Amino acid sequence: MPDKKLEFDLEGIDYDNLNTEADFKKEAKRLLPAAMKMAGRRVAETFWKDTHKSLGLTNSQKKEFIKEAESEFAQSPKEFVRVEKMLISKLKERKRNHSSKK
C-alpha cells in the first residue's frame, strides 16, 4: 500500500478546468501511469530497505528487485484504484488552494 504522504507531480495542470468529478477523474487517469511508477518505486525501495537482509538479498540485486516490484505494483488493480483516489484527492486539494489564491 502506498504511503498517504506520497507527493505527485501536479505541475502544469489547469485547475480552472477541473470543475466536475469527471474532470478530476479524467486528469487523475492521465497522471496515473507516472504516479503508479513512482508509488511502486517508493514501496519497493521501502520494502528493500526493511527486508533485503532477512531475505538474503545483496545490494547487487537491488536494481532488479526494485524493477520487478515496481512492475508488480503497477499491475495491481487494488493499488491502481488506491493511487487514483489519492490523485483525485490531491487534485481537489490543489484546486481549493489554487482558487483561494485568486
Image: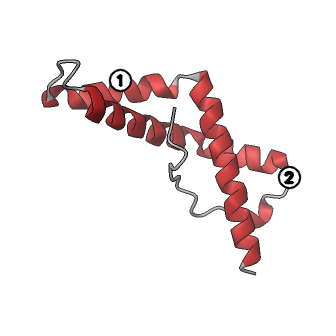
SS assignment at label 1: helix
Residue wearing tag 1: 68
Amino acid at the residue labelled 2: Thr
Which image quadrant for residue 12?
bottom right
Residue 64 shown left or right of residue 75 in the figure? left
x 47%, y 27%: residue: 73
Picture quadrant where residue 53 is located: top left
**Quadrant of the rendering where the C terminus is positioned:** bottom right
Residue 56 pos. (x, y %): 17, 18
Q: Secondary structure at mark 2?
A: loop
Q: CA distance from mark 1 to mark 2?
A: 37 Å
Q: Residue furthest bottom?
A: 102
**What residue is at 29 percent from the left and 32 percent from the top?**
50
Mark number, residue 20: 2
Q: How is the image coloured?
A: secondary structure
- State whether residue 32 is above or below residue 62: below
**Residue count near mark 2 (Cα–Cα under 10 Å), binned few <14, some 14–19, many ≥20:** few
Can residue 14 be seen from the camera position used here? no
